[in-house]
Amino acid sequence: MMYPFLTLDDDTVIVHSEMKPDGSVKVYVEKPDAKDCFHSAYCILPMYKWEMVDGFSDEEIKKYQKIIESTAHLIMRFSQEGGFNNASGL
């Protein structure tokens, strides 16, 4: 299951999985693109390992890496509590 986490001002969407038994969490980044339809990538926490990068430049991945690093503590917590909505009681 993937849980919504953050939508950036350029319509980039960041969602995350539940925490896996090995303690990892998959963070999925997707951005609409007029030419290619969507650009997407996965970042596996806590290793910050990027996989299946499609359409994003190295600079964009660096930007998303900073965003994920600054919010990883929240993502890891929410991944154990059923996402933001469940963790916040909404």
Image (spheres, helix red, strand yellow):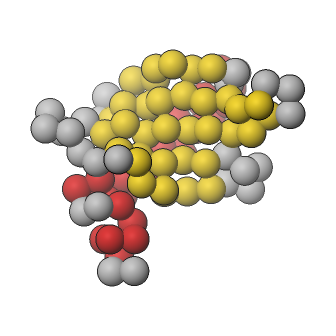
- The image quadrant where one finds the C terminus is bottom left
The foreground one among 23 and 36 is: 36
Instruction: Give the image location of residue 6, x and y in percent.
Output: 55, 56
Residue 25 makes an appearance in the image: yes
Instruction: Give the image location of residue 86, x and y in percent.
Output: 32, 71
Residue 1 position (above or below residue 4): above
Instruction: Give the image location of residue 16, x and y in percent.
Output: 41, 46
The foreground one among 68 and 79 is: 79
Instruction: Give the image location of residue 38, x and y in percent.
Output: 71, 32
On the rendered structure, is 24 left or right of 36? Answer: left
Residue at horizontal 67%, vertical 46%?
12
On the rendered structure, is 29 left or right of 78? Answer: right
Residue 64 sits in which quadrant? Answer: top right
The foreground one among 45 and 33 is: 33
Residue 72 makes an appearance in the image: no
Residue at horizontal 35%, vertical 61%?
83
Residue 10 position (above or below residue 35): below
On the rendered structure, is 74 left or right of 60? Answer: left
Q: Residue furthest left?
A: 21
